[in-house]
Amino acid sequence: MDNLTDTTTNDKVDADLQVTKKEPENLSKIQETIKKLDEFFSCFFDDDETIHLRFIKAKGETQNLPVKNATLTRRNLREDSESIIQLLRLNKRYGVYFTVNAGGTKKNEINRYTAVFCEDDERTIEEQLKRYKLFKSSILIKTKRSVHTYWLLKNAASLED
């Protein structure tokens, strides 16, 4: 995969901003980000399993930006530096989200359940943390405005399970 592809239009995702591989400080940040993302995604997906991404205009972004959808794999993430550069570029103007369970973005496309996910944008971070402490989560990530909580399933389950 040379670039992220918008799964809605099959066009290459336009990332708008310039990042060059020649800048050493950017390169080390990119390598660190790749390692962290790969480690995180390994909780949900195998190396060559499709990860479905959605890019939604970031809060505070003044331009009217369309929602974008894209796919990649963990292997692409590690081996295709252009994909991670595009993700970093897009993350400046978009919130980047992924579908927790495998198979697709719609209920009828999901073929493997890997985790239960919860977030609550209506409560403060402190309120969310207090509530989530009641149920020990597998992964808890604090973002600027929310807490993302994941309970990993020991054995990924199909819909029939």
Image (cartoon, rainbow, N blue to C red):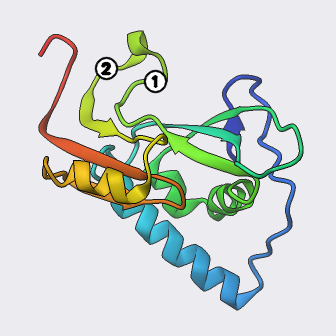
- Residue 18: image quadrant is bottom right
At 77% from the left edge and 23% from the top edge, which residue is drawn? 9
Q: CA distance from mark 1 to mark 2?
A: 8 Å
Please tell me which residue lies in front, 36 or 148. Answer: 148
Report x, y in % for residue 55.
66, 41
Please tell me which residue lies in front, 131 or 13. Answer: 131
Pointers 1 and 2 in contact (C-beta within 8 Å): yes
Taking the view exactly as shown, the residue that stands out farthest to the bottom is 24
66 lies left or right of 109: right
Q: Is residue 2 visible?
A: no
125 lies left or right of 44: right
At 41% from the left edge and 57% from the top edge, which residue is drawn? 125
Disc marking residue 55: none
Label 2: which residue? 111
Amino acid tagged 2: Asn
At 26% from the left edge and 35% from the top edge, which residue is drawn? 116
At 23% from the left edge and 50% from the top edge, which residue is drawn? 132
Q: Can you say which quadrant of the picture contains the C terminus?
A: top left
